[in-house]
């Protein structure tokens, strides 16, 4: 039998506080294989990856590379063994160029000085070879999250990784970017690279992976060949019960206009801009904003959030949505602590804050030890639940939800989307900015597609299919004088079929 590139034997991690994050994990990864690791938020996926990369030490069990047991005391040892990690949250230097970020710590040098030309040529060659579009000279601070994710992948490849750990790579990529990335991963696997793909998306398991392993509660509950799996069965393994089909929101009569924007223009010096955006959002409706990442959606969300009374759910929860070193409680009440019952006469009521946070944790199913746990210790999906719970606790009349379920497992995404629909049904106006077309199509009453900072098409939401939006997202098609005003025409029904 061929010795696997990676094998885990009874891998276990128990933290000093008693939390059992991984319990006897068995897994094998062959050369030339893409293996999907799936599970709910808090199922133990990230802990397992951290052990493979030397960021955590196992409590029991073994990690074998090419049949030999290894133990990494730091990431450097894992890198030298050919392991590359692409984290869920980017860890780049914003003021550096793409090339400098990619080669950081492994720079081509001459007499102790960085060879800028050599670095640029190396990154350009890597980007072309693997189909990961990147401008070596661009500043990372000017890039979209999707582009920054590609830089993280290039960093791992530059260091010669042949075993690639990807933690939710599609969570920050638009559909076409995800397709390009997964095509590149397939090419890498065909050339002999091993890929462990952590994902929440069942479609990734079925369409991209060769085999899969499902974790729940830190244990392996299912594994097998992707070609033998079915979506419903995988979903049931992930959440521990069969999931009913998602129901589309029932159309409702719109109320008064709560949000109006005219002629929004913003130039950033980078590719992303706003080029004269008009939109209205009425009480009791969700306006979905779709588009390939970097076409102005993020700028639009931030511009709308500066308007009085608008509550924002930011797309980058780690850097903009939470204070990672503070507790869940401190983050959960960050926008409501000034009002009763959380404070009285300017004095915080700590018992009331604790009770409110516990209610949030229970209501949103957050996997946490309690309100005083540092929010930065939560998985990305559980962190996102707190971010959305905090926004809803403010009882907003207007909510701008930017990537509200990015990196969230299927059960939690279903729950969070239902909360957005309930808010809409209660009379709020919601702008939904999402790179997940299924989410846009499922929730939106109207849809605006953005391309190069402008609205390229305005659509009725109910009954629309993804194919109708594709040409407008890429710029191949454009509706004349498109806007998302309430009185603006929709793309012709025949064209949107």
Image: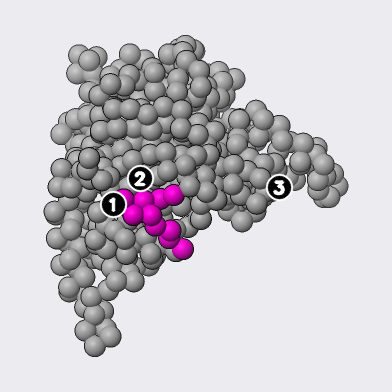
Q: Position of residue 474 (x, y in %)?
A: 20, 36
Regarding residue 486, the answer to whether it shows in the image is no
* Mark 3 residue crowding within 10 angstroms, few (<14) / some (14–19) / many (20+): some
Quadrant housing residue 447: top left
Q: Which range is magenta?
A: 62-73
Using the image, tell me which numbered label, if any, was put on residue 372: 3
Q: Residues within 10 Å of mark 1 (few under 14, many from 20)?
A: some
| Tag nearer the camera, 1 or 3 | 1
* Residue on which the image places disc 2: 7
Label at residue 453:
none
Q: CA distance from mark 1 to mark 3?
A: 42 Å
Where is residue 201? Give x, y as percent: 37, 31
Disc 3 element: loop
Mark 1 residue element: loop
Residue 66 is marked as: 1
Compare residues 346 and 108 and report the one nearer the observer: 108
Q: Residues within 10 Å of mark 2 (few under 14, many from 20)?
A: many
Position of 186 with respect to 215 (left or right) is left
Label 2 SS:
strand
């Amino acid at each position: 039998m061929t010795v696997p590139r990676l094998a885990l034997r009874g891998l276990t991690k128990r933290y000093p506080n008693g939390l059992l994050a991984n319990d006897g994990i068995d897994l094998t990864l062959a050369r030339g294989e893409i293996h999907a690791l799936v599970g709910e938020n808090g199922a133990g996926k990230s802990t397992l990856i951290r052990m493979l990369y030397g960021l955590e030490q196992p409590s029991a069990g073994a990690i074998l590379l090419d049949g030999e047991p290894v133990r990494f005391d730091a990431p450097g040892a894992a890198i030298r063994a050919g392991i590359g990690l692409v984290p869920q949250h980017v860890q780049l230097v914003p003021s550096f160029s793409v090339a400098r970020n990619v080669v950081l710590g492994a720079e081509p040098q001459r007499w102790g000085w960085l060879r800028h030309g050599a670095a640029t040529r190396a990154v350009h060659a890597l980007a072309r070879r693997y189909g990961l579009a990147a401008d070596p000279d661009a500043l990372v601070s000017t890039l979209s999250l999707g582009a920054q994710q590609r830089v993280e992948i290039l960093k791992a490849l530059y260091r010669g990784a042949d075993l690639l750990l990807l933690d939710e790579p599609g969570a920050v990529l638009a559909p076409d970017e995800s397709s390009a990335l997964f095509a590149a991963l397939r090419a890498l696997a065909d050339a002999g690279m091993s890929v462990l793909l952590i994902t929440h998306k069942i479609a990734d398991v079925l369409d991209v992976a060769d085999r899969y392993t499902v974790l729940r509660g830190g244990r392996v509950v299912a594994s097998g060949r992707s070609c033998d799996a079915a979506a419903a069965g995988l979903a049931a393994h992930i959440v521990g019960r069969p999931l009913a089909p998602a129901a589309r929101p029932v159309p409702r009569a719109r109320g008064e206009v709560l949000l109006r924007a005219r002629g929004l223009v913003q130039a950033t010096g980078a590719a992303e801009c706003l080029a004269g955006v008009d939109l209205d959002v009425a009480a009791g409706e969700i306006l979905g904003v779709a588009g390939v990442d970097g076409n102005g959606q993020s700028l639009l969300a931030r511009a709308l959030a500066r308007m009085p009374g608008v509550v924002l759910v930011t797309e980058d929860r780690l850097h903009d949505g939470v204070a990672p070193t503070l507790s869940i409680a401190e983050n959960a009440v960050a926008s409501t602590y000034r009002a009763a019952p959380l404070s009285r006469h300017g004095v915080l009521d700590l018992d009331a804050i604790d009770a409110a946070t516990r209610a949030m944790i229970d209501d949103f199913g957050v996997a946490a030890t309690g309100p005083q746990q540092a929010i930065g210790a939560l998985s990305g999906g559980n962190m996102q639940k707190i971010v959305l719970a905090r926004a809803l606790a403010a009882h907003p009349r207007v909510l701008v939800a930017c990537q509200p379920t990015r990196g969230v497992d299927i059960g939690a995404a279903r729950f969070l989307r239902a909360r957005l629909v309930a808010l809409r049904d209660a009379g709020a106006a919601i702008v939904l900015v999402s790179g997940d077309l299924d989410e846009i199509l499922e929730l939106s009453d109207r849809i605006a597609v953005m391309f190069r900072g402008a609205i390229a098409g305005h659509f009725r939401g109910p009954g629309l299919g993804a194919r109708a939006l594709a040409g407008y997202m890429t710029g191949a098609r454009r509706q004349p004088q498109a806007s998302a005003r309430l009185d603006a025409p929709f793309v012709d029904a025949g064209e949107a079929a």
